[in-house]
Every structure is written in C-alpha cells, then in structure tokens.
Amino acid sequence: MMKTSQGQKIDTIFVLGIFCAFAAMVLMVLMLSGRMYKNMINLSDTGYNDHTSLSYTWSRVKNEDEIGKIYIDDFRGIQALCFDEEYNGVSYRTMIYIYDGRVHELFCQKELSFSPEQGTPVIEAEKFSLKELGNGIIEVTTDTGSLLVYPRSREKIPT
C-alpha cells in the first residue's frame, strides 16, 4: 500500500516534532547541569576560603615550638601574629595579618622596615583578629569562627 503525499508530510512533521522535543529536553538538561555545576564550584570555593585561613594560621603556629616566640604585635597600625626565628645569627620575623581583604604573610629581617602591602597574600578574608589570653594562648578569629592556638613546646606553660 502506498502512502499518500499528505501521509508523508504528517510523518515528516511528526518525526521533526519528536526531534525538536528531544533537542529541547537535551538543551534544558545541559543548562540545568551547567547551573548546578556552577553552584557546586561556588560552594566549594566558599568552603575552602572559610576553613583555609584558620587552618593556615593553625599550621603556622604549630611550626613554631617555643613559648615567647609567638606573639601579637602592631605592624603599622595593623594587628599581626608574629613569629621570631633566628638563622645563622640573624633575627627574622614572620608576620601574619589582614590587609586589603586578604590574610598576608611577611617574612623579613627584624631590624628592617616594611609596609603591609609587601606581604604575600595567602587567602581572602574580611576578618582576622587576634587576642592574647595569657599563658601563651592566642585566640584567632576569622570570618568563620575562632581558634585557640598555643605553642606545643615541651616546656610546661606557666600558670
């Protein structure tokens, strides 16, 4: 039995309609998955920034091992967490501070003068405050919370 010209047109329109519907569904799935991927990346970046400033500070403090070598100091009007070290008879200071919306680190000779913008940006943060609680314990507060840090010296912390 032969199909009429009208029947072939209907078949063609039906096939094109199904193809267009399939193409529209594929496009919607791609758009939705792209949006979901973007949201996942944003959440991942936010989580990374939220925890990195605290983790970074914790690990830097844990690298220093002596009471009295970790302290809070004023660095050109900015509160900084400082570590004193000595290499080959030369005194150095590492400072961690917030400047221009980022936590910075600056490693320099103690006697030399530097400005806050010369530090290396580590991570974005809006808040990085320090408070000495006594007995070598320092409270670090960032955008995401607080952390108590203290040197892990073998010496007993004086009470």
Image: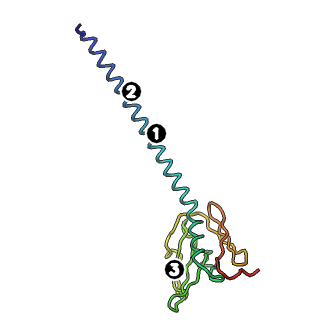
Task: From the image, tell me which residue sits under label 2.
Answer: 21
Give left or right: position of 52 versus 21.
Answer: right
Distance between the alpha carbons at the discs numbered 1 and 3: 47 Å
Q: Which of 70 and 113 is in front in this view?
A: 70
Q: How is the image coloured?
A: rainbow
| 2 or 1: tag closer to the N-terminus | 2
Q: Which residue lies furthest to the top in this view?
A: 1
Examine the image and state in which quarter residue 150 appears. Answer: bottom right
Quadrant showing the N terminus:
top left
Quadrant showing the C terminus:
bottom right
Task: From the image, tell me which residue sits under label 3.
Answer: 107
Distance between the alpha carbons at the discs numbered 2 and 1: 16 Å
| 3 or 2: tag closer to the N-terminus | 2
Q: What element carries label 2?
A: helix
Specify the amino acid type for callout 2.
Ala
Q: What element carries label 1?
A: helix
Where is residue 127? Give x, y as percent.
61, 65
Examine the image and state in which quarter residue 71 appears. Answer: bottom right
Task: From the image, tell me which residue sits under label 1.
Answer: 32
Q: Is mark 3 on a helix, strand or loop?
A: strand
Specify the amino acid type for callout 3.
Phe
Give left or right: position of 111 versus 7.
Answer: right
Q: Image point 58% across, 83% down: which residue?
A: 84
Specify the amino acid type for callout 1.
Leu
